[in-house]
Image (cartoon, helix red, strand yellow):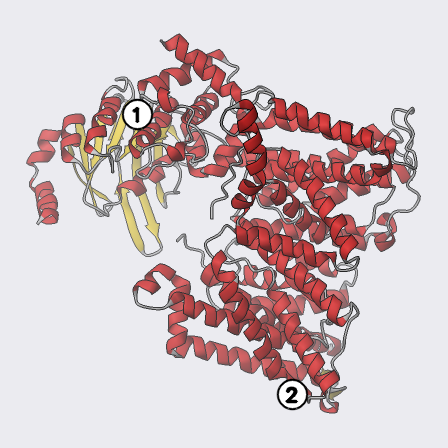
Amino acid sequence: MTYALETSGLDKHFGGLHVTRDLSLKIVPGARHALIGPNGAGKTTVINQLTGVLEPSAGRILLEGQDITDLPVHKRVLRGLSRTFQINQLYPDLTPLETIGLAVSERLGGGGNWWRRMGTRDDINAEIAETLERFRLLDVMNDRTSTLPYGKQRLLEIAVAIAAKPRVLLLDEPAAGVPEGERKDILAAVAALPRDVTVLLIEHDMDLVFSFADRISVLVSGALLVEGTPEEVARDPQVKAVYLGEAA
Amino acid sequence: MTTNAQTDVGILARQHGRWHWSEFAFWIVVLAVGLAFPSRYLIMTEILRLALFALSLDLILGYAGIVSLGHAAFFGVGAYCAGLLSVHGLINEPVLALIVAGLAATVLGFVTSFLVIRGVDLTRLMVTLGIALLMEALAERFSNITGGTDGLQGIDIQPIFGVFAFDMFGKTGFFYSLAVLFVLFLLARTIVHSPFGLSLRAIKNNPLRAAAVGIPVNKRLIAIYTVAAFYAGIAGALFTQTTALASLDVFSFERSADLVLLLVIGGSGYLYGGLIGAAVFRMLQELFQWITPQYWMFWIGLVLVVIVMVGRHRIHAYALWLPNLILRQIAGRKAAVVLTDNEAP
Amino acid sequence: MTSILTNLFDGVAYGMLLFVLACGLAVTLGLMNFVNLAHGAFAMAGGYVCAIMVNRVGWPFFAALPLAFVASAMIGALLERTLYQHLYARSHLDQVLFSIGLVFMTVATVDYIMGSSRIFIKLPDVLQGQFDIFGVGIGRYRLMIIAICGLLTVGLQLVLSKTRFGSRLRAAVDDPRAASGLGINVPQVFAFTFAFGCGLAGLGGALSAEILGLDPYFPLKFMIYFLIVVTVGGSSSITGPFLASLLLGIGDVAGKYYVPKLGPFVIYTIMIVILIWRPNGLFGRTATR
């Protein structure tokens, strides 16, 4: 079958540091897949290779059966692979409206358009409005991003990834640093994703992982330790050793 | 609800690109000044030319965040191209020659953009500086074509469209330059308020995020750098056409450095900065030359040092204090003139 | 054959001079990530101090050289404490604007005080003329430059690798934050190094009056050369800038001799190619940090 996202023999060295070891992941379409592991396991490095920020030392990456290993970042996005960052990567001087507007324009093929004014295409406006509304950002849509409270910025970070209408969405610790009161907005946004979107979640919060994921891969020192359903992973003695060992 | 939101989004998104009454006022003042001081056409033409040159730098620095210390390379190519077209009688119609000269600079801009988009600020500084020096060295090497330090001899610019001859008072030159500046300003204004222009600001703000929403970062930077080269080339060609001069100093480092200075004086990232900066800079220069004819460079240097030490943003806040106060009094709303340009440290 | 060797000799002398002139800039750029386009102004200051002492006051040349160092170092220290240190955290654009402003002011000031024409420093007879070794013409002055600059380079290398200050400096260059965590007073280390680098530039300026020519436009004319040394050589060690200086010196002398009409063209082209090929410099770090 064609996997939504597949890696084979992914390997990454930083000088003498071996941060990804022969990693082969297979994620089925529509999956809610979580990638977990102790600190320094190399989870974000994997995401960076999947999205093209880093070039793998060896191995291939397939998106819906097509090899994307050598594609630049932006082309992967247009093929349907989108991500959020662990630390917000937003445009401080732009408004949420403009931020979402850019993502939508780019996907609908109007991004390179230099003769038309922003805001003159109804289909783009409608989609911006719909996204802003879904993420409760309508009230602040004309404020500079740098002036927004952190929780709103986090929502915007996820909204902009989803505005790219991904087939596969990579969420890098979406709830990181969000105060308890604002977490539910973010969790609701993640839960409300359409079922046909495949999600790969990287998360430290085990409650979130087990309530969300239908399949879990455990990464230790850059290599895949265990993969299985949440129940299997929870029962696995090796995983327990890694996590209890870390907790102790 | 959703349709309302959609309408709001449309209105707010278009808001940026709408003509503000202060912009109409600006251009009316420019025209009025032009008509009011017929004895000052030469210096006013110089300001317009500088303004166009600065507009070019603003497109890459203010919008895309590319620092350049070698923008004179394109100015120079435009200047020599216009000069050579005239000397050899290849194209005698000035407007056509202007466009051809601009396109010559565009070609150089496109080719060198691949070098410039690579690397960080410092590499870009060095590469842009290097390209300008290279052009200067080339112009010196081929002095049989360029006339070397003496400059091109025998530039004779024919009447525009065969009708409007360049006069000794510079009247034709002034209105010609003003028309060119205005047309290119309109084009720049369209560009920066388009999705393409917005994506440049996004790249300047956060290239990582820009790429992660599908913006082809390098392609956009190449595009705007090439467009900026066209603008600079046109500015250079205007220089040659309105002064009938083209010598090696069109490529000089001081020309590039002054350009950065005047854009900083006017403020980058809102298009009018270059225009205002050009006027302020030229008048400062005039003032300094009047105080100490030989050593005005000292004062320009001092202005630079003071601007940086006090902080560009603070200076703009001071300069805008009065206009904003008046705006608040008259219009009874928040200040309309706000500058936001944050270069990442 | 002999002309090749003479050119090589001249090129080495020129390169070593460039190194002494520019190595302070390598530190400014490497340690504080500060783009100081005004480095040449400190060199010019040293050159003019030396010229005034020798030509007007009548000091011997060799006594005026140390003074050139001290004067430039003091000016450097003063400016670092009063102006430069406030700009370390600013954008490169601000730093560029500031240092260009400083260059403009220096050029105009020197022009005002000393006039705009090139000045020469009276050299003692010992340093004039040249002698032949196996038919290879060796200029006495250039031989002295190689000797002085060679000693300085060796000395610098020893200071950096063997002394406590050297290890502090290297730690601070590598990772300023970690270094200050280890109790190293990074601002102090930098202020001292900045002043020392300016001093070296001043000494270089005094030495170069004979070879490069000294006039008020010196900082602008040679700015690109200093920047080439640092960006091509990389700023992670002094070996890189040293090798880059030698290459540039030999290349420039050879270029002017063999292809006089294309001299600067060759240099700038090579610089651009290297910067595109290795943005961190020919001898700089390549690993992503």
Q: Does residue A54 appear left or right of residue C50 in this picture?
A: left
- Give the residue type at disc 1: Ala
Indicate whether A57 appears above or below C119. above
Foreground residue, A48 or B288? B288
Circle 2 SS class: helix
Does residue C48 show up?
yes
Q: Does residue B343 appear left or right of residue A149 in this picture?
A: right
Residue B266 shows which numbered tag?
A: none
Instruction: Assess disc 1: are there few (<14), some (14-19) or many (≥20) residues with their C-alpha within 10 Å of its C-alpha.
Output: many
Does residue C274 show up?
no
Percent x, y of residue C176: 38, 61
- Give the residue type at disc 2: Phe
Instruction: For mark 2, name the chain.
Output: C
Percent x, y of residue A144: 42, 31
Circle 1 SS class: loop
Residues marked 2 and 1 touching at CB (< 8 Å): no
Percent x, y of residue A59: 34, 40
Label 2 vs label 1, nearer the camera: 2
Task: State which quadrant residue B194 falls in.
Answer: top right
**Residue visible at 67% across and 75% down in the picture:** C47
Percent x, y of residue B318: 55, 42
Residue C62 shows which numbered tag?
A: 2
Quarter of the image containing the N terminus of chain B? top left
**Residue visible at 66% across and 83% down in the picture:** C143
**Residue visible at 35% across and 32% down in the picture:** A148
Give the residue furthest to the front: B329
Foreground residue, B270 or B72? B270
Q: Cα distance, mark 2 to mark 1?
A: 76 Å
Foreground residue, B76 or C94? C94
Instruction: For mark 1, name the chain.
Output: A
Q: Which residue is mark 1?
A: A4
